[in-house]
Amino acid sequence: MFPYLPQQSGYKKRLRSALGLVKRVIRMLAKSSDYWLDDCWIVDSTPVPCGMSRQTVKRSDLAGWAGYGYCASHSRFYWGLKLYLVCTPSGMPIL
């Protein structure tokens, strides 16, 4: 009744392999708009926690990249990275 059962979706693999293309398209769109030459760019960041326990921090492969920080909006310390977004006031992503 089911001659072929599909395996887990390859979405993540395709997304990872297309990352460079997606970045280039966003950059091309941003440069082709009038907002690229705008004097005002907005930067926002959010913490991305990578681990909660000391054992995780010691064993993690992110030890050279991640660090301790304080997030005032969540009123807590975290160990991880910060994700930044640079965009124009109209919402066009730049970086």
Image: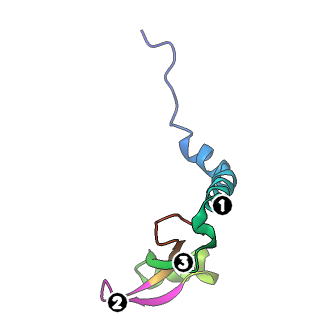
Q: Position of residue 90 (x, y in %)?
A: 46, 67
Query: From the viewer's perspective, is residue 39 above or below residue 12?
Result: below
Q: Residues within 10 Å of mark 1 (few under 14, many from 20)?
A: some
Q: Main secondary structure of the magenta part?
A: strand
Precedes in sequence: disc 2 or disc 3: 3
Q: Nearer the viewer, mark 1 or mark 3?
A: 3
Cα–Cα gap, marks 1 and 3: 14 Å
Q: Position of residue 20 (x, y in %)?
A: 69, 55
Asked whether 32 falls inside the magenta stretch, the response is no
Colour scheme employed for the rendering of this structure: rainbow
Cα–Cα gap, marks 2 and 3: 22 Å
Q: Secondary structure at mark 3?
A: loop
Q: How many marks?
A: 3
Q: Which residues are magenta?
A: 67-78
Quadrant of the drawing holding the C terminus = bottom right
Q: Which residue is mark 2?
A: 72
Q: Is residue 19 visible in this depiction of the protein? A: yes
Precedes in sequence: disc 1 or disc 3: 1
Judging depth in this view, the residue of 86 and 17 nearest the camera is: 86
Please give the label number shown on residue 27.
1
Identity of the residue drawn at 62% across and 51% down = 16
Asked if the residue at tag 3 contacts the one at tag 1, i.e. Cβ–Cβ closer than 8 Å, the answer is no
